[in-house]
């Protein structure tokens, strides 16, 4: 499904990685590990198409993603470092907007269910500015519960700021998604326990110098 | 696709409603800058009448520039912009929706306020129509051009000043034609040519600026 060919990424005259490649089929999980500054986020951004690799290309079902653009992005959920939620909007409004932007419409009922699943019952109509860091992360991740039909999830440090219960919930969401035959790429320091038939791992080396 | 655009406009308007102070700052800035001129120039009715359209236009231009860095900055800071870049809707359309919302919040109120402020300059009421119409056609062009500048300077240190240097020269044609509309009417030539030119600016800017801004955003976020 997803294929990376001979990727090289140079940030500020420093090569983060080169000659990196992988091939991910449906139902497979790819974990990107590595120290701070080893290029995990850069790699994920390259896979999304937010960042152009210095060399190499990403292929989605055999085609270069830079040709596919919106067609690829409509089949992708990316949850980055930042939560992409607005302090002045409520959790439910935030979730609805991210879903609509991604091209899927979600009814209020579904949004409520997704938020409850992430343990945010009762917070739906609070402005997110009053929520804690972990709760905000949960609002961002609640999108996963609404993205069951999306065949590729890309998660950047999904477990930051989450408590044990939420970590478990996210792991479960990912495992269920893999069981549906979708592919998941994630970067984390945390040793996650995700049930998966095939689990790949890329270790990005420590930065040279 | 339309749902996305409606959603983006609705969201930006909702955010503006919940952060009213930001919007009011721009409006008050406009009111104060325009009001400074009669105080500074002195109560000479003939002179005031002559400078009125120019002063209102320059103030509108500065006010809309003041509001510009808000177009993308907040979305950039909290990561929403990344999601917009990865949206299933072409980014140019999302940018167009954002600019439209931005204009509704920071351009349209200026247009509506302009006749009230023109009273301070003793501008004959017969010219109010042309003044409002020229601003109505011109301020969206300012927002559209400004969006390109805002996208280019996103995330740069000292972006605000750079934005002004980048965008103000591009505003000059709009300023000349816009402020000229009322003067043309006063001189008896009629404002039609000016208004048509402004409309042409608007059509060209609306067709191209969102896509240029979209490309600039992709470069800024790399």
Image (cartoon, rainbow, N blue to C red):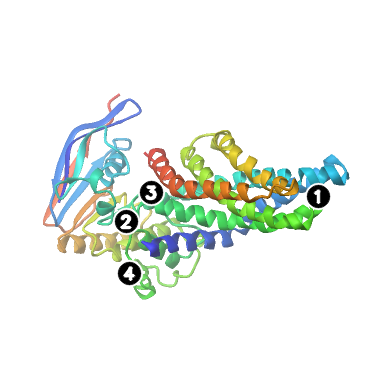
- Tell whether A196 sits left or right of B202: left
Q: Are marks 3 and 4 in contact (CB under 8 Å)?
A: no
Q: Dot 4: within a 10 Å radius of its alpha carbon, few (fewer than 14), some, or many (20 or more) residues? A: some
Q: Which residue is mark 1?
A: B121
* Closer to us: A178 or B132: B132
Furthest-bottom residue in view?
A109
From the viewer's perspective, is residue B67 above or below residue A143? above
Q: Could you tell me how far apart the alpha carbons at marks 2 and 4 are, in whole angstroms?
A: 26 Å
Farthest-out residue, right: B43
Q: Position of residue B128 (x, y in %)?
A: 72, 56
Residue A117: mark in rendering: 4
Q: Is residue A37 left or right of residue B19?
A: left
| Residue B167: percent from left, percent from top | 55, 38
Question: Can you say whether A60 is above or below B14 in the image?
Answer: above
User: Label 3: chain?
Assistant: B
Left or right side of A50 for A132 = right
The chain letter for the residue carrying disc 1 is B
Disc 2 marks which residue?
Answer: B88
> Helix, strand, or loop for circle 4?
helix
Q: Which residue is mark 3?
A: B82
Quadrant location of residue B1? bottom left
Q: Secondary structure at mark 2?
A: loop
Q: Are marks 3 and 1 on the same chain?
A: yes
Nearer the camera: disc 3 or disc 2: 2
Gap between marks 2 and 1 measured at Cα: 50 Å
């Amino acid at each position: 499904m997803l294929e990376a060919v001979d990727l090289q990424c140079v940030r500020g005259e420093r090569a983060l990685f080169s000659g990196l490649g992988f091939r991910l089929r449906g139902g497979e999980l790819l974990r990107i590990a590595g120290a701070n500054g080893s290029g995990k986020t850069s790699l994920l951004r390259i896979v999304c198409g937010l960042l152009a690799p210095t060399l190499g290309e990403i292929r989605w079902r055999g085609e270069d993603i830079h040709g596919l653009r919106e067609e690829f992005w409509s089949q992708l959920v990316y949850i980055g470092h930042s939560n992409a939620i607005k302090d002045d909007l409520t959790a439910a409004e935030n979730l609805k907007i991210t879903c609509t932007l991604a091209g899927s419409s979600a009814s209020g009922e579904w949004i409520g269910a997704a938020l409850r699943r992430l343990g945010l019952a009762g917070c739906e109509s609070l402005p997110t500015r009053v929520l804690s860091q972990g709760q905000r992360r949960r609002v961002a991740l609640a999108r996963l519960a609404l993205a069951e039909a999306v065949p590729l999830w890309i998660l950047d440090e999904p477990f930051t700021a989450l408590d044990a219960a939420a970590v478990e919930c996210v792991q479960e969401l990912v495992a269920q998604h893999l069981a549906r035959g979708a592919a998941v790429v994630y970067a984390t320091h945390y040793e996650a326990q995700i049930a998966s038939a095939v689990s790949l791992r890329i270790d990005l080396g420590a930065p040279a110098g | 696709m339309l749902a996305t655009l409606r959603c983006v406009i609705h969201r930006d308007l909702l955010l503006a409603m919940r952060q009213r102070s930001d919007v009011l700052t721009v409006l008050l800035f406009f009111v104060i800058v325009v009001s400074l001129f009669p105080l500074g120039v002195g109560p000479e009715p003939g002179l005031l009448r002559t400078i009125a359209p120019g002063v209102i236009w320059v103030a509108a231009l500065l006010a809309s520039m003041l509001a510009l860095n808000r177009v993308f900055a907040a979305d950039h800071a909290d990561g929403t912009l990344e999601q917009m870049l990865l949206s299933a809707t072409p980014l140019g359309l999302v940018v167009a929706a954002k600019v439209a919302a931005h204009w509704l919040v920071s351009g349209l109120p200026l247009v509506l306020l302009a006749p009230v402020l023109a009273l301070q300059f003793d501008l004959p009421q017969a010219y109010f129509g042309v003044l409002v119409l020229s601003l109505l056609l011109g301020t969206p062009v300012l927002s559209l051009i400004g969006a390109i500048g805002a996208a280019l300077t996103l995330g740069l240190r000292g972006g605000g000043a750079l934005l002004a240097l980048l965008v103000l020269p591009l505003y000059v044609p709009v300023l000349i034609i816009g402020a000229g509309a009322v003067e043309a009417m006063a001189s008896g030539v009629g404002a039609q040519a000016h208004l048509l030119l402004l409309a042409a600016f608007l059509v060209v800017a609306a067709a191209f600026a969102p896509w240029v801004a979209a490309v600039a955003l992709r470069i800024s976020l790399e």
